[in-house]
Image (tube, rainbow, N blue to C red):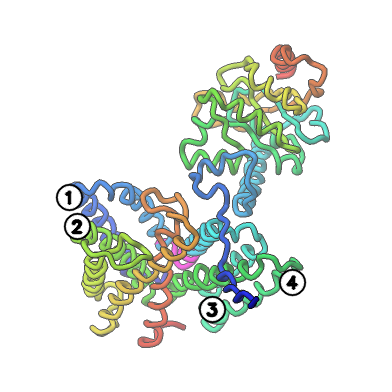
Amino acid sequence: MGASPPSDPPPLTFAYQPMPDLDRPLRERLGQYPRVPDMTFDALRTVARWLAILLFRLQFPLEVRGAPPQADRVALVANHASHLDSLAVLASISERRRREIAVLAAKDYFFERLRTAVGGSFFAQAVSFDRTRYTELRRWSRILREQERGTLLVFPSGSRRRSEAHDAILFVLAKSGWIIVPVAIAGTAEAWPVGRAVWRPFRRIRVTFGEPAGEVPTKELAAFLGEFWRANA
Amino acid sequence: METFAQPLPAYTALAAVGIVLFGAFLRVTRLTAGWAPYRTWLVMLPVVFAALWLGVWGWAALVTVVSVYGFKEFARASGLYRERLFVLVVYAAIVAMNLAAVFGRFGLFMVAPVWAVGLLTLVPIVRNRTEGMLQGFALSVVGVVYFAWFLAHLTYLAIWQDGLGLVIYVVLATQLNDVLAFLTGKLFGRHRWTVLSPNKTVEGSLGALALSIAFAFLNWQLAFPRFPWWGVLAAGLIVGVGGQIGDLTLANFKRNIGIKDFGDLLPGHGGILDRLNSLTLVAPVFLHFARFFFDGFP
């Protein structure tokens, strides 16, 4: 019974683990949610956000009524009539919430070209929502259920030219257990109307945060929001 | 701006003519594979020349940004990006080395890697962790030397009295060397010679080397008028050989990691590193060659 010869030790090798989104194009990486931590992008996003809000506050007198609740998994659901809407809401919330907020933005509008993806992601905290794909809501439903914290800004009308909310995204938000907070934005449509190339500074803008729509039945959310927007926007 | 005298307008005009001629060449030869990189060049060349026209600080800013992004690609591909502290130290080293270069502090510039590696040794101690730290440390040292220090030589080149010509020559000639290797390989390449980059052919590599030497002599009066003939020959050899070694070095990195490209920022090229690969080695070798033989730098 001789002892078996000692086997050679395994060769010493590095185990490379590339980042999971390595093979995705940059514009897709900028729009992904939840965001993969990226210190360069996070730093640039912080600087760009500060700059955008500073410029916004210097140009537009802002009145804020109410505040979003101090809770995790909050979806701010706002009316949409102007490119300034995202900045108006960003300027109205705390820096802690600004850091984590993600603004749902149309992929076909913001994330098909690198320059709009960079602008949207860095200056307006945008993430990509593919409104042309019919499985997108199912994907978001899964993402939202898995998220334990975060803040979303959603424009459920889907377009600056439409004033009524789409039911489907509200349904997904409600069923995923996120707190839906109605937000009414007034004055941005005059400050930067649809179709105009540049904005008009010094217009008064007002952002109103309503009470969470916890008790409102899912089917009536769109009507509830429409009423809130008409009363405050 | 004082430093950047005559070569800049001439090289700007040459680059504009070159890009038009290259477009015509692609159209005539119907090398469709060349169109995507060509379109990217139409963006990259103005960026490079705008930085040069802005002066030493503009150029240093571009080198710093490109180095940071290039190292980020390397860190994301190798997984080092998860170790934030290592990455932050390398980012800081990139900024510090380019500042040392702008201010012409040669001694500080030369020992900067020592200080950066010294800082890196603190990371496992600060993290109080051993797992993965050797790999993180080793990859970060590669980052400090290869992406921070080597590339910062491009900034240092620019501060010499004849530096502008050298910078433009090194950048353009190295990139041209890549294009020439690609074109001669496509047109005449038959014999592959390395597993590091299987598409490389003997014909392509030798063709690029010969044309790089010819390009150096064409640039003699514009880029390095004080060099003797053997200095110009050496300049061509440094670009022709060093460019291809730098290219193969990063190809080796990619094959070890198991990726095709470092990124997708530059359509038709890949990531920033896929474009800078040949410059990483040429820049330091060229600077120390010029400094040793022609004593040009402070």
Looking at this view, is A163 or A144 the one in front? A144
Does the CB distance between marks 1 and 2 fall below 8 Å? yes
Residue indicated by mark 3: B109
Q: Are marks 1 and 2 on the same chain?
A: yes
Left-right relation of B189 to B105: left
Which residue is under mark 2? B187
- CA separation in Å, label 4 and label 2: 54 Å
Q: Is residue B16 magenta?
A: no
Q: Which residue is mark 4?
A: B125
Q: Which badge, 4 or 2, is on the more N-terminal residue?
A: 4
* Kind of residue indicated by mark 1: Thr
Residue A104 in view:
yes
The residue drawn where x is 51% and y is 57% is B73
Highlighted magenta segment, given as a residue range: B53-60
- Decide: is A214 above or below B98: above
Q: Residues within 10 Å of mark 2 (few under 14, many from 20)?
A: few
The total number of labels drawn is 4
Q: Quadrant of the N terminus of chain B?
A: bottom left
Vertical order, A113 against B59 (above or below): above
Residue B96 visible (yes or no): no
Q: Position of residue A97 (x, y in %)?
A: 75, 40
Task: Say which residue appears at 41% left-offset and 58% top-offset.
Answer: B274
